[in-house]
Image (tube, rainbow, N blue to C red):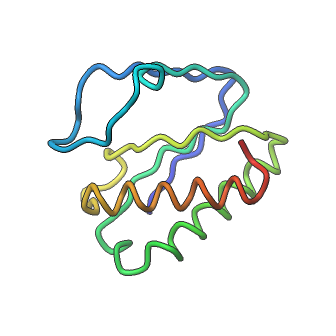
Amino acid sequence: MRILLIHADRFSYQVKGEALRRPEPVSEERKTYSTEETLVAFCAVEEQDEENLKAVAENAAKTIVETAGMLGVKHVTLYPYAHLSPNLSSPEAGLEALKLVEENLKAEGLE
């Protein structure tokens, strides 16, 4: 998994269209998002990550938790960002990995 971490005063997005043939259903309220004082984790799950998604997700979460701690940030925004790798996992594996990262971050007390 490749991760680009950016400490942002503000971060927002708006869903403009579907990026996948079979996207995860997104409620209307989740189609726009805005937050302040966040660590944005742009993530690309790679093909080789599919061999052990759990370990990859744990390592990614550990890196994010350590960085958030150094910055004194309690809020993390996970953002799938395919442009970080030319060798992406399947969409299903990518979604599963990001959900595992999210679970690990919540277990560490991050929002």
> Is 91 in front, or is 42?
91
Q: Residue at x 82, y 49 (%)?
A: 70
Q: Where is residue 64 shown, x and y percent of the image?
A: 66, 54
The residue located at (29%, 59%) in the rendering is 92
The correct choice, above or below, for 44 with respect to 89 in the image is: above
Residue 84, image x, y percentages = 37, 49
In which quadrant of the rendered image does the C terminus lie? Answer: top right
**Which is nearer the eye, 28 or 2?**
28
Q: Residue at x 52, y 47 (%)?
A: 4
Give percent across and percent down for residue 103.
61, 58
Q: How many labels were placed on the picture?
A: 0
Up-down relation of residue 71 to residue 47 (above or below): above
Which percent across, then down, holds residue 51?
36, 80
> Image quadrant of residue 16?
top left
Which quadrant, please, contains the N terminus?
bottom left
**Seen in the image, is 104 located left or right of residue 4?**
right
Report which quarter residue 62 is drawn in.
Answer: bottom right
Viewer-nearest residue: 60 or 97: 97
Please tell me which residue is depicted at 41% across the width and 22% down the height of the picture.
31
